[in-house]
Image (cartoon, helix red, strand yellow):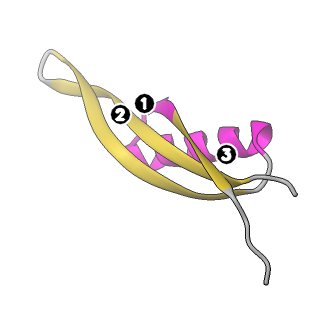
């Protein structure tokens, strides 16, 4: 029987374009630093507003990665 152990780390990503873009950027950047990224959970979403207009999108992600054997 095989088993694996994963770890979860929290990151924040920001985009001027959209929530989707912030998520993509956060996952891509995490994969550059962490090995074996296997999933992400969007924990929070937030927008920055200036003069009634959305100026930025921010997400808090829980990134899951499997630890090496």
Residue 8 at x, y percent in the picture: 57, 46
Towards the viewer: 62 or 6: 6
Identify which residue is drawn at 30% across, 40% down. Answer: 45
State the mark number for residue 39: none
Residues under numbered marks 2 and 1 in contact, where contact means CB atoms less than 8 Å apart: yes
Q: Give the range drawn in magenta.
A: 11-34
Residue 64 at x, y percent in the picture: 60, 52
Alpha carbon separation for disc pair 3 and 2: 17 Å
Residue 67 at x, y percent in the picture: 77, 52
Q: Please identify the quarter of the rendering in which residue 1 is found.
A: bottom right
Q: Mark 2 points at which residue?
A: 57
Q: Name the residue under label 1.
A: 16
First-in-chain label (2 vs 1): 1
Q: Name the residue under label 3.
A: 28
| Front of the two marks 3 and 2 | 3
Q: Residue furthest bottom?
A: 1
Identify which residue is drawn at 78% across, 40% down. Answer: 32
């Amino acid at each position: 029987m095989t088993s694996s152990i994963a770890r979860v780390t929290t990151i924040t990503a920001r985009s001027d374009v959209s929530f989707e873009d912030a998520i993509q950027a956060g996952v891509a950047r995490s994969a550059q630093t962490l090995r074996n990224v296997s999933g992400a959970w969007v924990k929070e979403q937030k927008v920055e507003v200036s003069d009634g207009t959305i100026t930025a999108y921010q997400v808090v992600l829980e990134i899951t990665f499997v630890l090496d054997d």
